[in-house]
Image (spheres, rainbow, N blue to C red):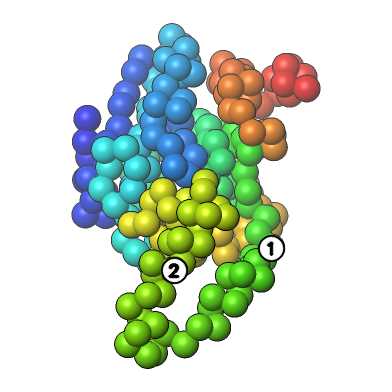
Amino acid sequence: MYIRVLNRKIHYKRMGKGSPVLFVHGWGENMYQLHALALLASKKYCAYLIDLPGFGKSDNPAEHWGVEGYAVMMKELIEKLKMTRTQYIGHAFGSDIGLYLSSHYSDCIDHLVVCASSFRRQNRISKPVQMMKQIPREQALMRLFYKPLRSLYYSLFHKDSDLLKYPHLEKNFRKIIAQDLTRDIRNVKNKTLMRQQSSPSREIAIAFEIGTGVNARARRAIQ
């Protein structure tokens, strides 16, 4: 299914009946990263999955979107689908969006489960990249070769770089990795369970507990 949000086509899927639970994938993934877990949750809840803009079957985001841009889109999506006060379960970048939502638009969600969030950014730049930034790009010859040289550098030394995998999202990616959310999470207003290990499976398995809040039994389940 599709819905238009902020003049963009967003791909989403709904399964089951009951109170809403929204599953949001990480950067470079799509809704099927969390599909099996959402399917499990749909036995008790109405589970929603989406493709974040730029991934899966959704349209690309605006170039100026960072974490806040994606969060505003998510707020509009929740309201359009009448999911207000949904349980929100996010992985990686999906977690960052959830934390920003809770900090700035807490009425949209009820409880929040975040896994492998990277909200703390140190904005470090490697020495080779610093050297590349010093190359004068004003000259016509350098403008011609700068991007190919940079692509060669990343293909040799950073083969798994998201800049190589998703060049159409470079401006968004650079803005996102430069944004530190440490101050924002101090204002998180919803009951939240945060885990920092990389796999989302064990964290999201406690979705069955969040109908009554992220309680002590749910916390013990993932220790």
Task: Residue type at mark 1: give it.
Answer: Gln
The residue that label 2 is drawn on is: 149
Q: Is residue 212 visible?
A: no
- Give the image location of residue 82, x and y in percent: 33, 35
Residue that badge 1 annotates = 122
Depicted 215 relative to depicted 113: above or below: above
**Residue at image point 45% right, 61% down:** 152
Q: What element carries label 2?
A: helix
Q: Does 187 sit left or right of 71 as displayed?
A: right
Residue 92 shows in this picture: yes
Tell me which corner region of the image, top left, top right, bottom left or bottom right, holds residue 63: bottom left
**Nearer to me, 180 or 154:** 154
The residue lying furthest to the bottom in this view is 139
Q: In this view, does 42 lie to the left or right of 209?
A: left
Tell me what residue is drawn at x 54 percent, y 75 percent: 132
- Estimate the x, y position of residue 24 in percent, counting from the top left: 46, 36
Q: In this view, does 130 lie to the left or right of 72?
A: right
